[in-house]
Image (cartoon, coloured by chain):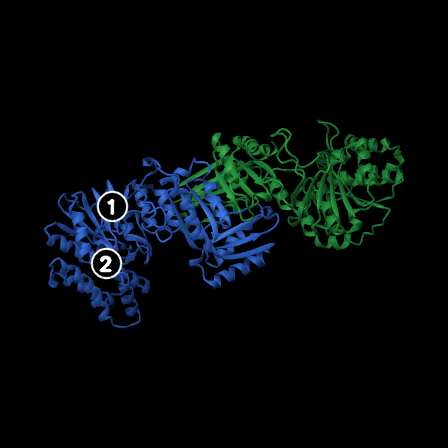
Chain colours: A blue, B green
Amino acid sequence: MKVIKFGGSSLANGDAFAQAIAIIKADADRQVVVTSAPGKRFADDIKVTDLLINFAKLTINGHTATDIIAAIFGRYQAIAHHFGVQDDELSELHELLVALPQATYPNNDYLMAAFKAHGERLNAKLMAIILNHQGVPARYVDPLAAGFRVTGTPNNAVISPEAYVNLAKLDLKPNERIIFPGFYGYTLSGYIATFSRGGSDVTGAILARTFNADLYENFTDVDAIYSANPNLVPDPLPIATMTYREMRELSYAGFSVFHDEALIPAIQGQIPINVKNTWHPEKPGTMIVPEHDFQPERILTGIASGRHFAALYLHKYLLNKENGFTLRILRILNDNNVSYEHMPSGIDDLTIIFDRDKLTDEQVDAICTAVQQEINPDRLEWIDDYAIVMLVGEGMAHTPGVMMNATAPLAANGISLQMINQGASQISIMLGTRREDANQAVQLIYQQFLTDQED
Amino acid sequence: MKVIKFGGSSLANGDAFAQAIAIIKADADRQVVVTSAPGKRFADDIKVTDLLINFAKLTINGHTATDIIAAIFGRYQAIAHHFGVQDDELSELHELLVALPQATYPNNDYLMAAFKAHGERLNAKLMAIILNHQGVPARYVDPLAAGFRVTGTPNNAVISPEAYVNLAKLDLKPNERIIFPGFYGYTLSGYIATFSRGGSDVTGAILARTFNADLYENFTDVDAIYSANPNLVPDPLPIATMTYREMRELSYAGFSVFHDEALIPAIQGQIPINVKNTWHPEKPGTMIVPEHDFQPERILTGIASGRHFAALYLHKYLLNKENGFTLRILRILNDNNVSYEHMPSGIDDLTIIFDRDKLTDEQVDAICTAVQQEINPDRLEWIDDYAIVMLVGEGMAHTPGVMMNATAPLAANGISLQMINQGASQISIMLGTRREDANQAVQLIYQQFLTDQED
């Protein structure tokens, strides 16, 4: 069997639903369908999830939200009407929306989670209604009834191991499709909690692992995962096949097509993932597979850049003779509730790399001041515009010259590297650059590795 | 003026003393002379410092040590007789040795330090006696009288800032040489404390900084610092000039000609250092200079390998989303009184590199067990035979291709790299290998960078 998940743009309107339904119908193995909330229909459209967040904020502030309820319900109505489904069949959807502000929640984080989750919940219900309307037997399965239990915080949930036990009891029938809402589950005390944004990918992966699926199909709005960001490189090569860990490394540095937390259940179950385009289901898309099923075709699979980093550079003579030096720094970070990404060290220097998006200016000042006072380094530099360029490829592991081919064009173009890090996995090289240089670095490395090979 | 320091083999016997005295006489600027203890005269000889350590151990165990006192004193006698200095002039030296077991010490660490220091102390006194005997006005200066104050532990002292103030009051006279014993100073409560072994280099550097010397000459038994270990590479190229930080990086990974702690006063005073051969003073030796005085002649200045490392490899999926992960590990290390060297990280993995010589097997078991229990990684591997190969050169900073030229021959010879780390300084590349591969890696990299250039 296959688990098939549709992204928000693949379920944004009637035309998109029609595409999705054709895809479901085309393969009887597509037994479990996971829905996202309706996404954008055009560039300036508002996603249903964002409408729901506004609805939640109005509720928290004690306002009524008649207009926004109408706007949200209108999105589902329009899809239903496209298939000739009448409003009386949608009464439950409307009631669920209206009931949201009436319910009680332990706190506003739970309220926000419950509101957000209804984009997926209503879309799954609607999908089941339309499929049955079209003569395709389909059953909506509610995460609460199915025992889809999560732990963690209300808006950053983690699947609970017992969920797998509960979900396995779902009765799959040969001629019936299960329609399951993505993005959320229920805490042990019975409240809705969502995964982080884009988390419907995670739901699909959990179901794929539960049923030991032959394939987890992830339908989105691109023909493939590309070897570089199409906004930086025109017509980048598509990636036909990649490994889980290649995907993970590329996700880290900016690839956002597939949610990185969704890789864990897939890895645990060794379920292959196929990222495909709802609008071109005939195209092969990108396969994400276990390492042992993979033969690299190219040295580099992809190049990513994350431009949202910052770095603290410290130099102190005979630094590494000081016991507990790093521990003191980490305690300072911990005391200021700051986490860091990497900490490459030289003999007498240490660079601590941060995700700048997760740091306030006050935190930056606090940690720099504390480090200066407690550590008294010979040199302390805060580099606010740090970027990480990540070269990823299983094919790199035993290919000499990758580092030269990557760094030579950067040097020739005056791009200085703050850091080079190749770890034990040997399938990625991490380069630290100034933020202003990151895009050009990606372009130059792309030309070096991925243009020439096609000539 | 110049500060000139002689190593142990340069003061091991009468012939060596004669060489040293000729060197002192040859330049009136050599106003401050720092002595080591007499070293080995032949391959299986015992250094005076090691005799003193045995003397200390006998004393600690309550034994008398008449024979060993005679052996130590005999070394000085033989040197004195070489210059026609009679025993009656050496009575103070003998008295100082005999007095050592009579004195009281706060604990045995202080006792050990005091015993060890007398190798240098007696050699400085002897040098002053012989020079005056030869008509060269010379004055022994005692570290206690000169205010050479140190802090730290008895056998791992650190210079105290007030020492510079005190030492500056030493009255240098144009026609008089100051003879100063290396290796030790006095704690604030008046006890002898030594630097770590080889610390006479440190004493010389402190005096060079005190007097803002034009040059700090460090006389030893090699013609130069070589670009690789002569035990690994036959006839390696000598290094004509290098920077302080190149020396520091090479010291870290195994170059032992010059004590790395001695670089600090030199850097603080920007004093150039000249490492020369006592037996060939006409040869230029190796200059160690500030960065701004340096023009690299070659891409690589030197290649070192440290074979005494070990590494703990950890892999955990989504590791870097776990706040405080590294902090927990460092606390485990701290609780077990273990310090680490480097901690390169990938996206989901972390390698912690240790100096294996500083770790007991019990500590290894304790930290691995604690990490497994508290962190529960997906994978934990202890690599007991880790080596670090260090490529060092100011010329590398903006030369593309160094990484390829270094790694290609290793790959071609089946040497796999556990880690590549190029930090912010850009003058060194650190490669992690298996211990068994380290020597061959040095040889291959030497051939690549330093043989071809000479053809």
Residue at the (43%, 35%) spot, across then down: A398
Residue B32 lies, in percent from the top left, at 79, 45
Residue A17 falls in image quadrant: bottom left
> In the image, A295: left or right of A213?
right
Amino acid on which the number 1 mark rests in the picture: Glu
The answer to whether tags 1 and 2 share a subunit is yes
> In the image, B55: left or right of A397?
right
The disc at residue A393 is none
Q: Which residue is under mark 2?
A: A38
The disc at residue A217 is 1
Residue B348 lies, in percent from the top left, at 41, 45
Q: Secondary structure at mark 1?
A: strand
Residue B45 lies, in percent from the top left, at 73, 28
Residue B7 falls in image quadrant: top right
Q: From the viewer's perspective, is residue A297 above or below residue A90?
A: above
Amino acid on which the number 2 mark rests in the picture: Pro
C-beta proximity under 8 Å, tags 1 and 2: no
Question: Which of the pair A121/A435 is nearer the observer?
Answer: A435
In space, the residues marked 1 and 2 are separated at their CA atoms by 18 Å
Q: Secondary structure at mark 2?
A: loop
Residue B368 lies, in percent from the top left, at 47, 40
Pointer 2 indicates a residue of which chain? A
Residue A231 visible? The answer is yes
Question: Which of the pair A104/B285 is nearer the observer?
Answer: B285
Question: Which of the pair A248/B376 is nearer the observer?
Answer: A248
Instruction: State the residue lying farthest toward the bottom.
Output: A63
Pointer 1 indicates a residue of which chain? A
Quadrant of image for the N terminus of chain A: top left
Residue at the (57%, 58%) spot, across then down: A372
Residue B151 visible? The answer is no
Pick whichever of labels 1 and 2 is earlier in the sequence.
2
